Image (cartoon, helix red, strand yellow):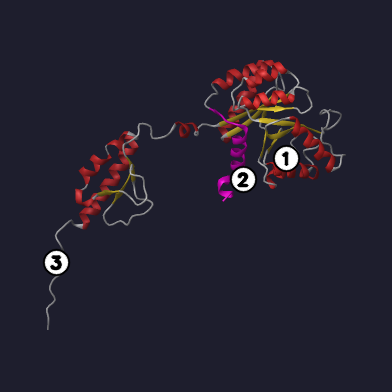
Amino acid sequence: MFRLRPIRRKAGIDPRALRGAEAAFWFVLALAFTLGGQSALSGLPRLVGMLLPKHAFAAEARDQVPTHVTSLKLPGLAPSSFTPQVLYPVVEHPFPEWMRASRLPAVAIVIDDLGADDAAAHQAIALPQAVALSFLPYPEPTPALAREAEQAGHDVIVHVPMQAEGEADPGPMALRLDLPAEENLRRLDWALARVPGFAGINNHEGSAFTPDRAALLPVVEALADRHVFFFDSRTTAASQVVPVARAFGVPSAARDVFLDDVVTPAAIAAQLAELTRLARTNGVAIAIGHPRALTLDMLARWCAAPPGLRLVRLSQAIRMKTEREIGVSLAVLAR
């Protein structure tokens, strides 16, 4: 009968000691990042050396990871995507400027009814590039002014006339409910051809046309083929532009604020304050203004230093509003 020899543990580190040291390490590391933020990164190697023996905590490069990224391998833990990583050398700013800016609420500004007044158009073109400029198709100067706006870096939009309620006249070549779809498409093509370099459209008037889904269908189909957006000026709460456009894959969102229905400094300032409030509440908001001297003067000053906001292009604001309203990232849907 053989006697079993007692199993001898190999000389080395007591696992219980390792577990205790490991727990202490993570506690102190979390505390350091909480209190020290960015500066805690620079002391991480020294902290590792103080808390764990050299042979118990090895730093090694992970497979297919750039040489400036170091993965920390803990004893007893299999490598995974959750393995801590340290950038070396530590950069001065942990967040790039665009990441810090992205935390701010976003606003987009659209100036529409452009094209008839050269001086007003040039004043609008002088606004920051992020401001979108929407041109009526029928004024004679529109093509040249639209080219100038595009060359200055603005998003150019076609301000397409659409039938309004009552006797309001949206202008020549308007899309109408009493016209066949073929004629409305012919008028749409004419309007688009008058505004070179356009990135999308928005409705001029349209309080009768935009609530009618059947009338909107051929319009959004045509826009889908051109891969441009349909920004809803929202001249009526009954508008169906956004749901119909999105159903056909056309980027779309609605206006939140009209800046200058009342053209006084106090009224425009109040609307800018409302735009700010909506952006801070929802993360993004869009305003429409018109090429009036007072509006453009006040916007020039406001855009120079928007209060705790970032000015974004209309196309970006449409995307942000869409993702917020449907609750899904458009990048995920595109996969």
Q: Which of 260 and 192 is in front in this view?
A: 192
| Element class at badge 1 | helix
Amino acid carrying label 2: it is: Ile
- Residue 95 colored magenta? no
Which comes sooner in the sequence, label 2 or label 3? 3
Q: Nearer the viewer, residue 248 or 118?
A: 118
Which comes sooner in the sequence, label 3 or label 1? 3
Residue 132 % position (x, y): 64, 28
Closer to the observer: label 1 or label 2? 1
Which comes sooner in the sequence, label 1 or label 2? 1
- Residue under the point 36% across and 45% down: 66
Does residue 67 appear left or right of residue 202 in this picture?
left
Amino acid carrying label 3: it is: Arg
As displayed, is residue 116 above or below residue 88?
above
Amino acid carrying label 1: it is: Val
Reading the image, the residue beneath label 1 is 241
- Residue under the point 27% across and 57% down: 76
Q: Which of 13 and 158 is in front in this view?
A: 158
Residue 70 % position (x, y): 31, 45
- Residue under the point 34% across and 45% down: 85
Q: Residues within 10 Å of mark 2 (few under 14, many from 20)?
A: few
Reading the image, the residue beneath label 2 is 326
Residue 283 % position (x, y): 56, 35
* Residue 8 marker: 3
What secondary structure prevails in the magenta region?
A: helix
